[in-house]
Amino acid sequence: MNNQQYHQVVKKAAQKKYRGKKAVVSKYIPSYPNSAEREMKRISNLYLKLLNQTIKEHLPVVMAMYKEERYGPDRQDSLRDLVDKVKQEIMLAATELEQKLSEFGLYSLVEKVGKTVQASSLREWKKCVKSTLGIDLFEDYYKGGFYEDAIRRWIDENVLKIQSIPRNTLGEMQQIILNGFNDGETIRDITKKIQAEYDVTRSKARALARDQVGTLNAQITKLQQQDAGCNRYRWSTSGDSRVRDSHRALDGQTFSWDNPPEMWYITKHGIKKTGRRCHPGEDYACRCCAIPVFDIDTINIPIREMERSER
């Protein structure tokens, strides 16, 4: 059976649900993969806990160096001496941290999150198809290679992003100490700045977890819908107070996967366009979803009863 013949079979199976219409919007609104986001945040928190432990172990040593250079009997205001000592201690901290992180199993943990997003997206997609068209999907079609490239890219990118967090933070910590020496700051002031830097890092890590889960879910959703012949979708927000103004304005509107809407935000001077065009889930930390629009002329869904090696 070729693709054209298969399309006719699918069209016939779903036709009664259209009731003479050319296209129908999914009766089911896909849910955001909250469990995957929670797991991604948990991984980030555990990773940052190792970083925090390392900082606490080495910060007293570095502060003792600072105190000696700043207030010691042989004080010479030598930034070069302090730079060398601090760099050595930070390098030691980085080496120890690298060893701890190597035992963390980051790749497998992030991979698990990716698989959770995949399973959640497929479950929601099945509900969309079943509730709207009365068709049971052939699930095996979506396993293996269908998502493989997108998920592997996502895993690799996120492992690198998470791995960069402790290295960047240690670098920032070193700079805070050296700048403090130059500016004549107290040990207390420098310690507060280092804690503030860690707090910022923790917030960024949590935001990254939320953003990246939404990004992967958006990628998989787009793959599923376009592959099934859904060339359009209806924008749907999460409906809570966290929804940004531009996304709230898009809620309920229909867009083509080939032409995403432009993002904007409100300033005191009015609306400012960002120049970025995004589908649901692609904007930063977006939890919106794309409700599929099933067009009778392009529908091409893998039906459970008809297993095929190719489509």
Image (spheres, rainbow, N blue to C red):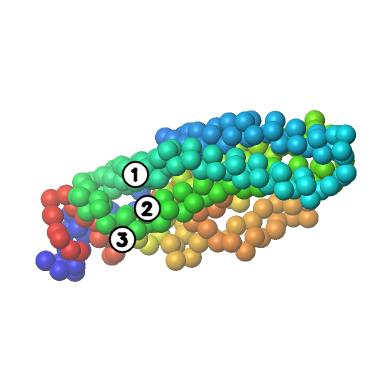
- Vertical comparison of 143 with 297: above or below: above
Name the residue rendered at 37%, 54% in the picture. Answer: 152
Q: CA distance from mark 1 to mark 2?
A: 8 Å
User: Which image quarter holds the N terminus?
Assistant: bottom left
Q: Are marks 3 and 2 in contact (CB under 8 Å)?
A: no
User: Which image quarter holds the C terminus?
Assistant: bottom left
Name the residue tied to disc 3: 227
- The mark nearer the N terminus, 3 or 2, is 2
Name the residue tied to disc 2: 151
Q: CA distance from mark 3 to mark 2?
A: 16 Å
Name the residue rendered at 77%, 45% in the picture. Answer: 82
Residue 192 at x, y = what percent?
75, 33
Indicate the quadrant where residue 126 lies: top left
Q: Label 3: how many residues lie within 10 Å, few (<14), some (14-19) or many (20+)? A: some
Residue 184 at x, y = what percent?
87, 41
Mark 1 secondary-structure assignment: helix
Q: Is residue 55 visible?
A: yes
Q: Are marks 1 and 2 in contact (CB under 8 Å)?
A: yes
Indicate the quadrant where residue 74 lies: top right
Q: Label 2: how many residues lie within 10 Å, few (<14), some (14-19) or many (20+)? A: many
Q: Label 1: how many residues lie within 10 Å, few (<14), some (14-19) or many (20+)? A: some
Q: Nearer the viewer, residue 232 or 49?
A: 49
Mark 2 secondary-structure assignment: helix
Name the residue rendered at 82%, 43% in the picture. Answer: 181
Q: Amino acid at mark 3?
A: Asp
Q: Nearer the viewer, residue 309 or 109?
A: 109
Q: CA distance from mark 1 to mark 3?
A: 20 Å
